[in-house]
Amino acid sequence: MIERYTLPKMKHLWSEDHHYQVMLEVELLVCEALAKLGKIPKKAIPEIRRKATFDPERIREIEKGTRHDLIAFVTNVQESVGALGRHLHMGLTSSDILDTSLAVLLREASEILISDLKTVLSRLRRKANLYKRTPCIGRSHGVHAEPVTFGLKLAIFYDEAKRNLERLERAKEAISVGKISGAVGTYAHIDPFVETYVCRKLKLTPAKISTQIVQRDHHAYFVATLALIGSSLEKIATEIRHLQRTEVLEAEEFFHEGQKGSSAMPHKRNPVRCERLAGMARLLRGYAQAALEDVTLWHERDLSHSSVERVILPDVTTLLDYMLNETSEIIRDLLVYPENMMKNLKLSRGLIFSQRLLLALIEKGLSRSEAYDRVQRLSMKAFKEGTELKDEILRDGDILETLTAKEIEDCFDLGYHLRHVDRIFKRAGL
């Protein structure tokens, strides 16, 4: 588990004590269900609940001999209960407890992540509206394309985050699956009622059919969803990293007083948090690959998935929890420079308005090919000679025969490109 990045709620969720507590609750709910079926005396249940406890150190001591963690856990709980301990774990296999308790933990982790993502959404929404009409250059292939607004950039991230919230909520339900069906899923030694009862109490869905385990496509879907959310966060981080480049500097991470950017160069202000997010997104995608590998197991179950999940499930939820909180703070404290956005927008000396000129010529009757060639020829001349495209257009006799000076001037109107911003924001729910 990546302890350094674990926030308090997630740290508690994956703690040894909490995990054992959830496992104990599964065992106790099984006892309750068996009592309802008359398999255990009903009067025994209160005493079992009152006495049942666990001691992590004692469990580790027992496991040295058993070399089986679940048997060590059950043995320790039976010790705490005394003679009534014989009723524990009746008709069950280890995975009945382990998979059902894991589903509870992943459901709880999902709720933390959903809360985190809602905070990111809230801050993206606020920032997008704040810079809704702040012009900046749009880039394709990293090259100046046409004008957008900084708010539109953030609105794109907001809309994607909304989709990710929907995905995460679906993944939460997909992972909330328990099973109490015995060694190979046939309920040979446990009544199906027990599974229904336990899962209802734990807010889980009983697996429609299982082997010794809940099938691992559930877990792969969950981890892949978290990896996808991480990729969306990397997308935000990568945009900020580009915008923070010295020759761009349209936005940058907040630089705290006393913060150091380089051990060698005192002037440095580096996008280190965004770079960290990019690296962590790679880890999440690696975990998704591992989860996909776990889907295929031998027959009714082998153990190859277990060692993988003990690493990747705490890590993937911990990392995404950290990444969402980091992203939220980065967005909240982001430094934005509208004056540099306008300076960069003008950097190409009007070349970004070439499509408007192209369309204006087509509307006057020129073929698309002829109009394109005329505008491209003058655009390349302006590019090579460092002149303004508008000046080149106004000096060209062929174009002046087609467009008036007023029509040419209109083609360089920045507001024309941004006239549908309000409509786009409305469609995005902003």
Image (spheres, rainbow, N blue to C red):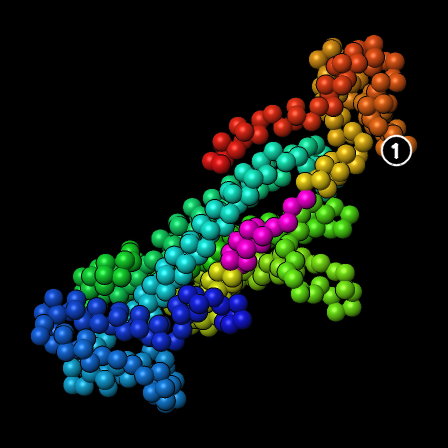
The image shows residue 88 at horizontal and vertical percentages of: 21, 77
Q: Is the magenta stretch mostly helix, strand or loop?
A: helix
Residue that lies at the very extreme toward the right in this rendered image: 385
Residue occupying image coordinates x 84% and y 28%: 388
Residue occupying image coordinates x 46% and y 62%: 317
Q: Give the range drawn in magenta.
A: 323-337
Relative placement, left or right, of 290 versus 355 is left
Residue occupying image coordinates x 60% and y 25%: 419
Queried whether the magenta region covers residue 328, the answer comes back as yes
Q: Mark 1 points at which residue?
A: 386
The image shows residue 369 at horizontal and vertical percentages of: 77, 19
Q: In this view, does 144 lie above or below 249?
A: above
Inspect this view and state whether residue 52 appears: yes
Inspect this view and state whether residue 222 appears: no
Residue 368 vs residue 383, the one in the foreground:
383
Relative placement, left or right, of 269 versus 429 is right
Q: Is residue 74 above or below residue 398?
A: below
Residue 245 vs residue 209, the one in the foreground:
245
The image shows residue 181 at horizontal and vertical percentages of: 26, 65
